[in-house]
Image: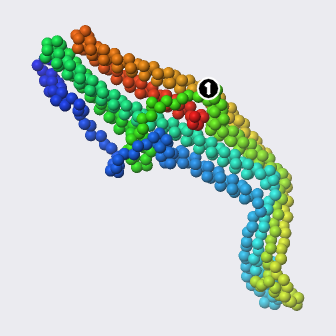
Amino acid sequence: MKCFASVACVTFLAVSAAWAQSPDSVLPLPFARPQGPAAPPTVITLQDALDRARKIDLSVQSALADVKIAGEDILQAKAARLPSVSGNAGYIGTQGNGITPNGRFVGSDGVHVYRPLATVREEISPNTILKTDYLKASAAQALANARVDIARRGFDATVAENYYALVAAQRRYAATQQGVQTAQRFLDVTQQQERAGEAAHSDVVKAQLQLNQQRRGVQDALLAIEKTRLNLAVLLSPTLDENFTVVDDLDSTKVLPPFAEFKAMAEKENPELKAADATVRQASFDVRSARNALLPSLTLEANYGMEANALKFHSTVAADPALGPLPNLGYFLTFNLSIPIFDWGSSRSKIRQAQTKVQLANLQLTQAQRQIAGNMYAFYNEAVAARAAVDLARADADLAAESLRLINLRYQAGESTVLEVVDAQNTLIEVRNAYDDAQVRYRVAVTSLQTLTGGF
């Protein structure tokens, strides 16, 4: 290619010459970064990233809070089945009538009435006997625990995806650096052959263009690292602390279990099914509670204390002082039997309402079962295909490296063109990136499988 005397050509040659003086350099990019502590970067594994992210993720922490709330509901339901004890201290001061020691009000046998009482109260109802509220609270806690697993596994998949995106970005940066070195060596070869009269100047220009392209690839790779690191920092640190490095474990292959074993784990450990089943059980207890409202209930209340004109164990009754001091301490019992008779259909409406919720919960359970069954096959097949793609991409990377080596030798012997060399260089970088992408794809596929089964 001839370079005509124009401003664009002069500019291109000036930039090319400046880059050629520092072949291993890449123009710096002034990235903006969150300010972190001045300390060596922390090395974190995927498990470290998961542990950190779970502590600050709103969805996971909200699910854990629901578990604690459900635990308190169980405690309250247990306490509701037991007798309650309360104390009450009252005083009634009444204006006297001026003639008798009685007060002016009908219920006052004296001007002063003291009522310190200790009360034990117990309600015996169908809900108490059948432990309906307690069982409903237990189902709610099981539902909350299942939702914690759902939140954790879904969030773990997000963290793993961002974690391996950073690993892949770092690998691409390393690959582009190797591409710059390869392009620089090829530029040196073309320049040497041009000086020896064995290559045209157009080969040098093409080699320089290839080097510039690889340098731009390094800058793009640096930007990708910045983006993926920031995305991961958002998940890991409340202060966006980017002072960390990740461990590249893509080469430590996760082995897929046989599908039969995977299916058994998914059917046993899937939190979506557990949540749907707990929802059905919770709704069924609502039906029982609504039906129990149609049955009689008995309330027992035992009171011990005094209701006297003086705050003493023995005192004179103001209405009949002739009897002298009498004992004040004593007890009285209250039995109250409540029988529902008519409530304008409210109780029946609550039963129908609860039964509708049960029907809906059963539909949600069957829908979850179908969806999980479909996901089992889809996720497993994706992992199998991703595993095969890793093997093919690894073989392609080896072939591309060997192809570039042979074409370089042929070019130096005058048997291939500069376009073939440049194409082989680009092919090698593309294949290496494809290999990294295939490994990330496989790890993400495995993480998706683990949302159904947990770890394996």
Dot 1 lies on which element? helix
In-front residue for pair 136/105: 136
Q: Quadrant of residue 146?
A: top right
258 sits to left or right of 331: left
**How many numbered discs, if any?**
1
Callout 1: 10 Å neighbours few (<14), some, many (20+)?
A: few
Q: Amino acid at mark 1?
A: Phe
- The residue most toward the top is 415
| Residue 182 can be seen in this image | yes
- Colouring used for the render: rainbow
Relative to 82, is 101 above or below? Answer: below
Q: Quadrant of residue 374?
A: top right
Residue 418, image x and y in percent?
24, 14
Residue 84, image x and y in percent?
75, 64
Instruction: Look at 73% across and 51% down and name the residue there.
Output: 134
206 sits to left or right of 140: left
221 sits to left or right of 123: left
Q: Quadrant of residue 319?
A: bottom right
Q: Quadrant of the C terminus?
A: top right
Instruction: Look at 76% across and 72% down and name the residue there.
Output: 118
Relative to 210, is 318 above or below? Answer: below
| Residue 209 can be seen in this image | no
Instruction: Read off the residue under disc 1.
Output: 259
Instruction: Look at 15% across and 16% down and name the residue there.
Output: 194
Instruction: Look at 63% across and 46% down and name the residue there.
Output: 144
Q: Quadrant of the N terminus?
A: top left
Relative to 84, is 237 above or below? Answer: above
Residue 327, image x and y in percent?
84, 83
Residue 206, image x and y in percent?
22, 18
- The residue most toward the left is 5
